[in-house]
Image (cartoon, rainbow, N blue to C red):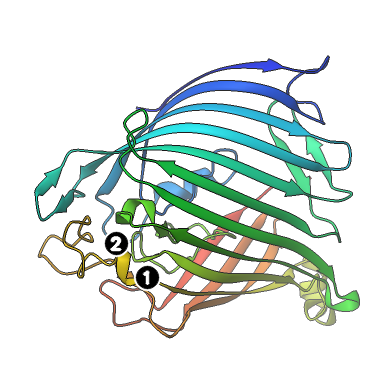
Amino acid sequence: MERFLSATYSLSNRTIYKFPQNYIRASFQRDTRIPGALLQFVQQDNFLLSFKRGVNDKYLYNDFYKFEYMHEYESHFSYQMILKKWTQTPAGSLYFINNTGKINDLTTAEATLLLRYAPNEKFFQGKIYRRPIPGPNPIFTLDYTKGFKNIVGGTYDYHNLHGRIDKRTYLSQFGYLDGFVEGGKIFGKVPYPLLTIFRANQSYNYDLYSYNLMNFLEFVSDQYVSVNLDQHFVGFFFNKIPLLKALKLREVASFKAIYGRLSDRNNPSIHPDLYQFPVSGDGKPITYSLGNTPYLEGSVGVENIFKFIRVDAVKRFNYLDNPNVAAFGIRVRAKFDF
């Protein structure tokens, strides 16, 4: 069961949802998540997420207590400060275990500063949600999180630094390219739930921001860089074929890569006091660190089918010896654009 309670107070003379935002908020949230799955609360294609390939029996019950301060400026620079107490409890076949035995839950106390700069950004503003309109200017985000031990139940000291740059590039008759690069590094010794668990997708929905042929909990890291490219040809090829031109079908292609590593200090095979990586029902490993080779995935597809459906043929290029891996798949995305 998911629960969310919040109270928000606007520090300006306007509604909290109107740009530029300036508010404080206190909230409590209880939910159930698959580790590494990207949450998509407001997408129109959520029904596709209910159909998943492979085994999906590892979950986390999460309790979040948060206090936030958000301040946006007319220049589209913003900063957000967050204080959070987070308790993770394993569920299903997932468990936390180290050399002392099973651990019931993991509690962390965190302070986060998030900076964002999106020059000349435009967006559609709904009553509650805001949808950015991609433009030619890059969007920069940088966030830093400090974990505190022995404060409101926090059990680990650590630092987490993450940055990302998003950019749409117009390529004349070749359409446009949406892409982002991001990277992160964790400083400190932490158990695997606090590492970067890469965004995996075992549903048949095509997810722009996840790795669509990666299994949940398959890869973790404490430092990484990644690139995500999504090319829209807007008819450059199909418009040369009369039938496809009449149907207004459009070509797309994508490429995703991650290069990362797990340092010795966060490797549970070296430090048995850390939580051991999850295993399958028969005791075989299902979670790995990336080696010297980056994870690679790509796709080609068709969009604008009936004006809102996209279908991609997705190929995973490496790490094919990992258990229960799908090297190829067809994924569908239903999206209503404004």
Q: Is residue 38 left or right of residue 119?
A: left
112 or 205, which is in the foreground? 112
Image quarter hosting the C terminus: top right
Residue 211, disc: none
Q: Residue at x 28, y 53 (%)?
A: 56
Q: Amino acid at mark 1?
A: Leu
User: Which quarter of the picture shows residue 129?
Assistant: top right
Q: How far across and down, in percent of the image, does residue 24 sit? A: 65, 22
The image shows residue 315, relative to residue 53, as above or below, that is below
Q: Is residue 124 left or right of residue 146?
A: right
Q: Residue at x 18, y 48 (%)?
A: 95
Q: Residue at x 20, y 59 (%)?
A: 276
Q: Which residue is mark 1?
A: 262
Residue 54, disc: 2
- Helix or strand or loop: what does disc 1 sit on? loop
In this rendering, does residue 307 appear at all?
A: no
Q: Earlier in the sequence, mark 1 or mark 2?
A: 2
281 or 17, which is in the foreground? 17
Image quarter hosting the N terminus: top left
- Helix or strand or loop: what does disc 2 sit on? loop
5 or 110, which is in the foreground? 110
